[in-house]
Image (cartoon, rainbow, N blue to C red):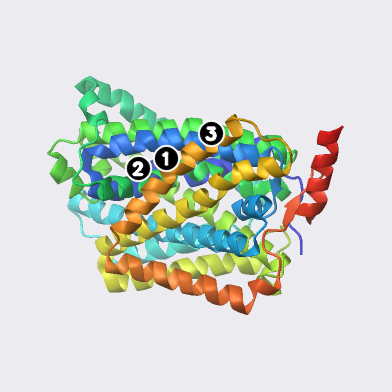
Amino acid sequence: MELKKAVLSFKETYAQAMAVTAPLGSVVSTTTAAILYAGSSVIFTTFLSLLTSALWIYTLSMYTKKLASAGGYYNFNYGAWRSKKLAFLEALTEMVAYTLLNVVNVIAVYTILSVVSDILGIIIPSWVIYSIIGFSVAYPTLISFTHVKKLLGYVVTISATAEAALLISLFFLSLSKGIHFDYFVPKFRNFGDLATAYVLTTVSISGAGAATYLGEETKNPHENVSKGMWLALIIGGISMFLGTYAMIVLWPGTINSLANSNQPLFVEMIKYGVIAFYIALMLSINSLLASNIGTTIGAARILFNLARENAAPKIFTKVNRSGEPLVATAIIGISTAIIVVLSVSVLGITGAFTEVAAVEGVLWLLGRILDGFGAPVFYWRINSLGIANIVIPITATAVNSWGDIQSVLQMDIVQLLMITVFAGIVVSWYILKARKGFPGTLVVDENNNVITIDEYLKKIKALNVR
């Protein structure tokens, strides 16, 4: 009934943060979707995302230095606002956003296979494609049942760092074409498109915050979680920005043709030979799968902790011998599979990719907005409020709010329908179950014990008085 306590070090928190950041996977997934909205302005939006993500990680560090989470961001939400409703809203927002990112990454694997078929001039049998797609759904789910230390320490760390190295190498390769400062100036049709592109690129870079879900399992969580997030942001975020710039600069055609290309990175890589092409192919797919491992770990722990707080059925507290949430992890995998099948069947590959990605990005930032405005409130509650604790979170949250609001204003009927379904799930779940529980109230103390936030804040206030 419990997760493994204090088994992770700084290396594993970095691996979890880097897995969800997934710089190479992001370039071929959410960044590729962002190009459809903003064209070459995706360089500007990625740079803006990098800056605001740094402010966001600073905001998260404000929380994690004082409060170790037992289930993710929504514990911070409750620490600030003391509202079960808001905490539960964020819990489901994060869980659904992570699941939808899984869906987007699985669809991205399909688009990669389609591009490979076109570039190499071969016909990939349907059963091979469906088998790979099935593997892309099943693998992150099944491997997430492995002991979290082995999973993050051996499977994720090496692959995540290798993909960053590839993106940085592409950037140096792009320097042969000179530095194009004009690409840093945004050119867009309307603010809505720019905002949607910003939201999509921010989804990936700010994924470094996923380390916060490991508070219970991390030694000295108040330090190691923050260190893992910052290292992943520096390596993953910067390499993603450099890789995005390289992809735009190395494109042989017009920006319009770039926006109409499903996977421009592979069109570019084939120019440098089959070996380079296959290296990019394998690392990209591996990056997408590693990202889905990180999001599955995070989403499962949300569901697991909600069940401990009596805000979800108790069956989700069941763990396997390795201390991994058994039923919760399985549900995230099954949900991913169902949404992939439904969205592709109804919308087609391209439609599912862009529509699901847009909704996922909006939900992703919604949680950040609740936490961002809440950070100064939390510091006020523990009598530690300062100027930096006000200005930095509010600045980051203001930009995120702009991106989310503009994106919502230009949503099409399909995206609005998805948001409506999500809202229905939140309201129904809260009425039927969560209102009877205490979502957001469990946190982790310095000894990795799960206690109520009121008990823990008493300790903090007592130390501050001394």
* Residue 403 screen position, x and y as percent: 37, 47
Q: Residues within 10 Å of mark 3 (few under 14, many from 20)?
A: few
Foreground tag (3 vs 1) = 3
Where is mark 1, residue-wise?
Answer: 23
Label 3 to label 2: alpha-carbon separation: 31 Å
Name the element at disc 3. Answer: helix
- Amino acid type shown at disc 2: Val
Displayed quadrant of residue 410: bottom left
Q: Earlier in the sequence, mark 3 or mark 2?
A: 2
Where is mark 2, residue-wise?
Answer: 27
Q: Earlier in the sequence, mark 3 or mark 1?
A: 1
Q: Is residue 180 at least partly visible in the picture? A: no
Q: Nearer the viewer, residue 339 or 288?
A: 339
* Residue 140 screen position, x and y as percent: 51, 57
Asked whether, in this view, residue 169 is left or right of residue 430, the answer is left
Q: Compared with residue 98, is residue 17 higher up or lower down, i.e. above or below?
A: above
* Residue 244 screen position, x and y as percent: 31, 36
Displayed quadrant of residue 129: bottom left
Mark 2 and mark 1 residues within 8 Å of each other at the beta carbon = yes
Q: Residue at x 42, y 50 (%)?
A: 288
Name the element at disc 1. Answer: helix
Name the element at disc 2. Answer: helix
Label 3 to label 1: alpha-carbon separation: 28 Å
Q: Mark on residue 71? A: none
**Residue projecting furthest to the bottom:** 432
